[in-house]
Image (cartoon, rainbow, N blue to C red):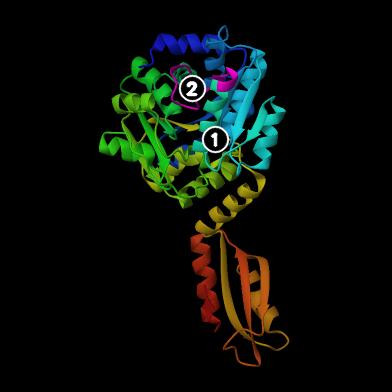
Amino acid sequence: MITLEKVKKAADLIREIIIMTPLVHSPALSRQFKGEIFLKLENLQKTGSFKIRGAANRILSDINRIGHAGVVAASAGNHAQGVALAAKKAGVPAAIVMPEWASITKQEATRAYGGDVIISGQSLGESLEKAKELAKEEGRILIHPYDDPDVIAGQGTIGLEILGNLNDVDMIIVPVGGGGLISGIASVVKALKPETKVIGVQSEACPSAYESLKKGRIVTVNSSLSIADGISVKQTGKLNFRIIRKYLDDIVLVRESDIAAAVLMLLERKKILAEGAGAVPLAALMSGAIKVKKGSRTVLLISGGNVDSPLLGRIIRQGLINNGRIIRFSVCLDDVPGALSGLLALVSSLKANVLHILHHRSARNVPIYSTIVELEIETRGPAHVREITGNLKKAGYYIDI
């Protein structure tokens, strides 16, 4: 297990490398969920996620054994950048094995932090095998992303910071992938304030820790594509699972639509950019998977903010659609002057914003003097959608949503 003394030692060791990230109170979220909600903003950490904490502690703890060959790691994103920068700060070379599908943005970010990027493998498992080969052949030290006591202790420094700023916290909600982050935080919290609940959150797309905890043993799960790719780990680490079984109060699952809505809410309400994995604690509150007791104090760990711009656009759009903020519908109109302007005038009078218009004059089964018009409009939400569709129907329009 990870002792409190080990985590405190890690905090001293990495103090000059990391940022002590802010813990901020959210009045808007507090009103919404009837409790005091705080956000621990690891998206503001160096490299954009918490990963540099564990990487830095692992490297600095073993700095005397690391030879001229340096270190090696396997990752598609946050761990890659964390190891690259931590190694650069420590003055040792770092080779980072990334799978072939790793985004160009994250490859370039890893190189910018000083990592020697090696593209190998169709999966993270294959990339990790390549990293192990390099460690053996070249004498590099392997920096595991989560199943390592020094990495876990480094991530546990977040727990020290939370309790140092908010000693009377009732619940801490943490994203769970391989388990390094939550096992480190739980080790600290249960040592200092055992009555504080520590609850993990995973996506339904990859429920590895959830299923392992339910079955009482480590299981490997099938996963599907998720916007929370940072926690899409098919199998929990061995040491991590032992700590999770001992200390965690619960693990819950959230849907992809919940995650998209949480990313959107953080961006719109708090001006906080969180990646999908970083937004799952808020998604758990929004979906009702976790309930907050009235007046209690809850910390949501926003674990990272590294999201590719194209993906962010899709996440925001999905969130808007799921929240009823964007709707698409089609209307069959007489193909005569004034028909479209009449429809648009009604939509405008209902204070909706037209985003896109498409005409389909040659659609199948459309009368020869008619046209199908497809509208995409921005609304204020579900109640506004009902108002718009109700008024369109009253005006004689047959709409297909």
The residue range painted magenta reads 137-150
Q: Residues within 10 Å of mark 2 (few under 14, many from 20)?
A: many
Q: Which mark is residue 95?
A: none
At x 48%, y 20%, the residue is: 151
Q: Residue 127 carries which label?
A: 1
Helix, strand or loop at disc 2?
helix
For image coordinates 40% across by 12% down, the residue present is 4
Dot 1, crowdedness within 10 Å: few (<14), some or many (≥20)?
many
Residue 329 vs residue 58, the one in the foreground: 58
Quadrant housing residue 113? top right
In the rendered image, is residue 153 in sight? yes
From the viewer's perspective, is 326 left or right of 212?
A: right
* Residue drawn at the location 58% of the way across and 86% of the way down: 364
Quickly name the residue at label 2.
Answer: 155
Q: CA–CA distance between discs 1 and 2?
A: 23 Å
Residue 159 versus residue 277: which sits nearer the camera? 277
Instruction: Say if 311 sits above or below 370 in the image.
Output: above
Q: In this view, does 100 lie to the left or right of 11?
A: right
Note whether 266 is above or below 399 in the view shown: above
Residue type, label 1: Ser
> Residue 366's spot in the image, x, y percent?
59, 88
